[in-house]
Image (cartoon, rainbow, N blue to C red):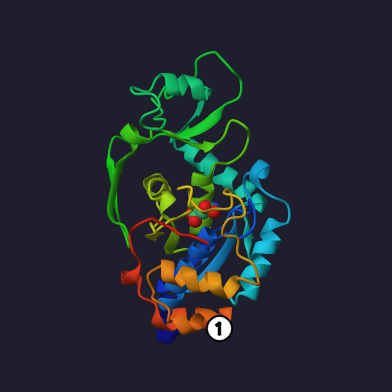
Amino acid sequence: MDKVLARNSEENRQVVGRFAPSPTGPLHFGTLVAALGSYLLAAHCGGRWLLRVEDLDPPRVIAGSADDMLRLLEQLGFEWDGDVVYQSHRSERYRQVLDQLRSRGQVFDCNCTRREILASAPHPGEEGMVYPGTCRDGMKGGRSERAVRLRVTDDVICYHDGIFADQSQNLEREVGDFVLHRSDGLFAYQLAVVVDDIDSGVTQVVRGADLLSSTPRQIYLYRCLNEAVPEYYHLPLAFGENGKKLSKRNGDFGVVTVENGAQMLWRALDFLGQQPPAELSATLPAELLCWGRNNFSVAAIPAENRQVEF
Ligand code: GLU
């Protein structure tokens, strides 16, 4: 009996990491960096590594790109645990959580347009769009499409990022009550990502530094749902020569293929500060991953977005 309990509590403490790409195009160097960083950190901690396809936003999804991405990751030697989760299959679960928040009075309907919200910002255009709380106490007349927003408080949310160190944000002043269900009927990324990570038992979130400022919203949501907050590690972003984030949305530049896979993996290890030996650049992808697992150092990852050239 004692042994069973001990094993269970060990399992409960096990690190669970994940990689959660959006299938909006081919696998890109920036996405490979996120895959590699999350994979190596989970492996380094003896943890599990899950894969989730974030295909929540149909207009942005490119047909076939999730399958192509998964196949390529397999060909490069990545192995994930368990079944791939698809956000597009989970709407009922998101609805359930939204209903739960509604029953506790934590969300409200809002029929403001983007323009109305922008117009009410103290310095429009300068500071993103802070929702001023217009519909908190009920909607006014106006358009019928409505979003569902989570009520936030005037508190500073602090967290320690494993790479970018201490972060803080006052949600009410810097973001405002944020959308969990969009007026076009889709569930918002902020809700889906938190519900999925909770349901999959994720304890370690490793992803691009463009999401550093989304994390306080997600931490707040964990608190509203009385769930344990995972550890966060945000990876530096790779910029292209045009200074834009190197991503699937940025054309063919830096696209990963089976042919250039080893070279791209070597460069991704290098980008993450792991200093792979030069002679490994001519080896097989699986061997590079093996070298990465054996030599990984989180402290070596630079907290600095950088330009890369191809
Ligand atoms: N799907 C997001 C992306 O591809 C990542 C979300 C996350 O890791 O939380 O940028």
Q: Tell me the residue at 58%/41% (across/down).
A: 187
203 in relation to 291, above or below: above
Judged left or right of residue 175, residue 69 is right
Judged left or right of residue 290, residue 219 is left
Q: Is the residue marked 1 within 8 Å of ligand 1, measured from its CB? A: no
Residue 272, x across and y down, in percent: 41, 67
Within 10 angstroms of label 1, few (less than 14), some, or many (20 or more) residues?
A: few
Q: Is residue 81 visible?
A: no
Q: Decide which of 12, 62 is in the foreground and name it.
A: 62
63 in relation to 275, above or below: above
Q: Quadrant of residue 8?
A: bottom left
**Residue for badge 1:** 283
Q: Decide which of 304, 177 is in the foreground and name it.
A: 304
Q: Tell me the residue at 41%/28% (across/down).
A: 131
Judged left or right of residue 95, residue 166 is left
Q: How many marks?
A: 1
Residue 91, x across and y down, in percent: 63, 47
Q: Tell me the residue at 65%/72% (across/down).
A: 259
Secondary structure type for disc 1: loop
267 in relation to 65, above or below: below
Residue 227, x across and y down, in percent: 41, 55
Q: Tell me the residue at 42%/64% (across/down).
A: 204
Task: Farthest residue to the top: give it.
Answer: 141
Dot 1 amino acid type: Thr
Residue 15, x across and y down, in percent: 43, 71
Q: Decide which of 49, 239 is in the foreground and name it.
A: 239
Task: Farthest residue to the right: give it.
Answer: 63
Query: The N terminus lies in which quarter of the figure?
Result: bottom left
Q: Is residue 184 visible?
A: yes
